[in-house]
Image (spheres, rainbow, N blue to C red):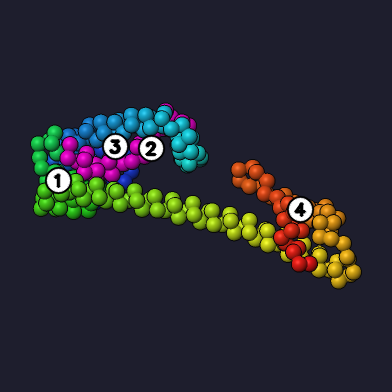
Amino acid sequence: MSILGLGLGRSFQMALDPSMYVSGGLAADLASELSPLIEMERQARKDAEKVSYAADPKAAEALANHFGGLLGPSGVPGQDFFIVDSVPWYELLADLGLLMRCAELLEVSVGALALAIADRLLPPNMLVFFWMGRALESVPINTALQWQKEAAASERAAAADRQRTVAQKTGEDGASKRWARERAQKAWWVEEMTKARADGYVGGRPTFVEERWDSFRKRFPVGVSADGRERAVSRQTVYRDWLKGL
């Protein structure tokens, strides 16, 4: 008994394999027609990846670091591995542009093809094809294309917002840490000067700072920022601003 009619095992298919269906049946015939078209699309996207990585080596390096490791592909993206190779056939085919090209080559309507994929091939995302087919049968194709463009634009905008939020949060966290460090340094100086005055110290603030500078540096070593530049407080800032009035 075949378990494929239940949709079991299909999530393990990267490529659409006609042999997974009953030979001579409608599902096998449809798979045989779609399989080469899907792989042509995969190759075209590989070529686009290769061009993209060659144009932006830093992005390619970041991608390699992101996907590398024991459980992911390793090497140079666009040479040793392609991201599109990790996309199963049914996700590639859910792209309306590819679905339209396949429908045109097979001389069927886009909606009918989507419904046939859901009904005969039973991919894991069969509901995507089912509702896509129902929608495409009831609205003009240009409207559907516009919907897809708007959805893609919305997702890009959302991704950009997420990146800005992360960058802002990172910046705020960094600024908060720097200010916390400066507050602690200032509090140390104020406390030291207050104790010294209580003990009868009558010297000026610049002299006091110079005398205590080594102790201060032992307590608060110079901080270094992510770009490698030192963020050290100056003696002038201490006696002119932090110890003002003491």
* Residue that badge 1 annotates: 142
- The amino acid on which the numbered mark 3 sits, given as a three-letter code, is Ala
Label 1 crowd bin: few (<14), some (14–19), many (20+), radius 10 Å: few
Q: Which secondary structure lies at badge 4?
A: helix
Q: Pointer 3: residues within 10 angstroms few (<14), some, or many (20+)?
A: some
Q: Is residue 81 magenta?
A: yes
> How far is disc 2 from disc 1 in space, using C-alphas?
29 Å
Upstream in sequence: badge 3 or badge 1: 3
Spot occupied by residue 218 in the image (x, y as percentages of width and height)? 80, 53
Instruction: Tell me the number on the disc at residue 83.
Output: 2
Query: Which of labels 2 and 1 is toward the front?
Result: 1
Percent of width and height locating residue 105: 13, 33
Q: Mark 3 sits on what residue?
A: 15
In percent of width and height, residue 206 lies at 81, 56
Q: Nearer the viewer, residue 237 or 100?
A: 237
Task: Classify mark 2: residues with Cα within 10 Å, few (<14), some (14-19) or many (20+).
Answer: some
Q: CA distance from mark 2 to mark 3?
A: 14 Å
Q: CA distance from mark 4 to mark 1?
A: 69 Å
Dots 2 and 3: beta carbons under 8 Å?
A: no
Quarter the C terminus occupies: bottom right
| Mark 4 lies on residue | 235
Q: Nearer the viewer, mark 4 or mark 1?
A: 4
Magenta span: 74-101
**Residue at horizontal 26%, vertical 33%?**
41
Foreground mark, 3 or 1, reads 1
**Secondary structure beneath disc 2?**
helix
